[in-house]
Image: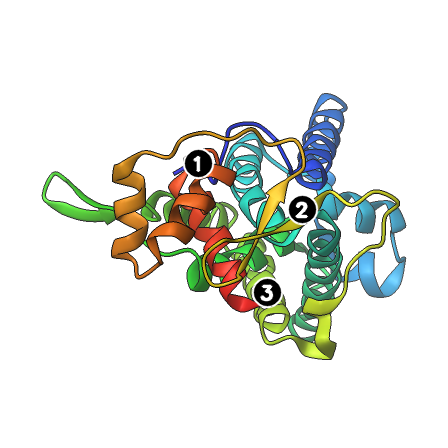
């Protein structure tokens, strides 16, 4: 389960965020300042450390957190492909800001001047992304490992759980705040899901479907790829129209997960 075509094709915002997160983490790691990352009560309410506020959005405080965090950010590029870069930019801004406000309230309530209560990194964005992942990405396959049943979504959840518990309370709190932020976005608070960042060049367009007049996002430069019959059958088994499933697979380059997202997005219009 890779979230669509490999690489950052049609996901420039995700690419920028992943690179920024990696560079910030490596930079502070080389300088030996990773242990200083993370927000405390003093950083927010006493001395207002601006550099910490900025770095806390991008830089992870340890290598394991970086590995799992970048993996999840890379996978969740599927949502940028689904809603477009303009709306996904708003999702990032809303997730980061809303989760930070929740974190500030939590720090104020827990008031502990002796330690860093919050670990550093884009926990708000990552765990906000688990909300649409849970509701909007269907399970397409099931399999067993040593008798235990898993779905094609299980390893994403396991990676998220590892990241959530990586620093225990310091990472648990930002993760929960991120889930709350993602829930607010899904509830369309202030009609936030309609907002988008305007740009001079539109990255995606809506292409009319020959079946039922539905519309599907299509990359401007995407090339047609003949979908496999197995992939079409899988989407049809989920309840989608055969012709719609075939066209979505063409636009998604025969990737079932990306095609599912396209079909779900089309149904929401």
Residue that carries the numbered disc 3 in the rendered image? 182
Q: Earlier in the sequence, mark 2 or mark 3?
A: 2
Q: Which residue is nearer to you in this view: 76 or 52?
A: 76
Question: Helix, strand or loop at disc 3?
Answer: helix
Please, is residue 28 above or below residue 167 in the view?
Answer: above
Q: Quadrant of the N terminus?
A: top left
Q: Which residue sits at x=32%, y=51%?
A: 235
Residue 239 as seen in the image, left or right of residue 24: left
Q: Quadrant of the C terminus?
A: bottom right
Question: Helix, strand or loop at disc 2?
Answer: loop
Determine the CA span between mark 2 and mark 1: 26 Å
Determine the CA span between mark 3 and mark 1: 21 Å
Please, is residue 149 above or below residue 176 in the view?
Answer: above
Residue that carries the numbered disc 2 in the rendered image? 120
Count neighbours of disc 1 (C-alpha within 10 A) and say few if under 14, some if 14 to 19, many if 20 or more: some
Residue 2's disc number: 1
In the rendered structure, are the residues bearing label 2 and label 3 in contact, judged by CB atoms less than 8 Å apart?
no
Q: Earlier in the sequence, mark 3 or mark 1?
A: 1
Q: Which residue sits at x=78%, y=43%?
A: 55
Q: Which residue is nearer to you in this view: 142 or 247?
A: 247
Q: Position of residue 181 (x, y in %)?
A: 63, 67
């Amino acid at each position: 389960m890779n979230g669509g075509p490999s690489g950052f094709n049609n996901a420039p915002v995700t690419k920028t965020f992943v690179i920024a997160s990696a560079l910030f983490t490596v930079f502070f790691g080389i300088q030996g300042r990773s242990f200083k990352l993370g927000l405390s009560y003093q950083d927010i309410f006493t001395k207002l450390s601006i550099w910490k506020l900025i770095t806390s959005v991008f830089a992870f405080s340890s290598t394991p957190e970086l590995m799992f965090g970048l993996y999840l950010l890379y996978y969740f590029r599927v949502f940028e492909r689904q809603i477009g870069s303009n709306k996904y930019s708003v999702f990032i801004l809303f997730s980061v800001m809303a989760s930070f406000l929740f974190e500030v309230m939590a720090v104020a309530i827990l008031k502990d001047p002796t330690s860093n209560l919050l670990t550093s990194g884009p926990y708000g964005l990552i765990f906000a992304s688990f909300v649409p992942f849970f509701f909007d990405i269907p399970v397409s396959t099931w399999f067993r490992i040593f008798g235990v049943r898993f779905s094609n979504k299980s390893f994403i959840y396991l990676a998220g759980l590892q990241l959530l518990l990586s620093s225990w309370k310091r990472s648990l709190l930002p993760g929960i705040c991120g889930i709350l932020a993602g829930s607010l976005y899904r509830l369309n608070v202030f009609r936030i899901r309609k907002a988008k960042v305007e740009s001079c060049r539109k990255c995606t367009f809506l292409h009319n479907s020959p079946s039922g007049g539905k519309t599907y996002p299509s990359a401007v430069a995407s090339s047609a790829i003949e979908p496999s019959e197995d992939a079409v059958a899988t989407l049809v088994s989920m309840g989608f129209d055969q012709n719609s499933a075939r066209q979505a697979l063409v636009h998604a380059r025969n990737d079932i997960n990306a095609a599912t997202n396209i079909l779900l997005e089309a149904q929401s219009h």
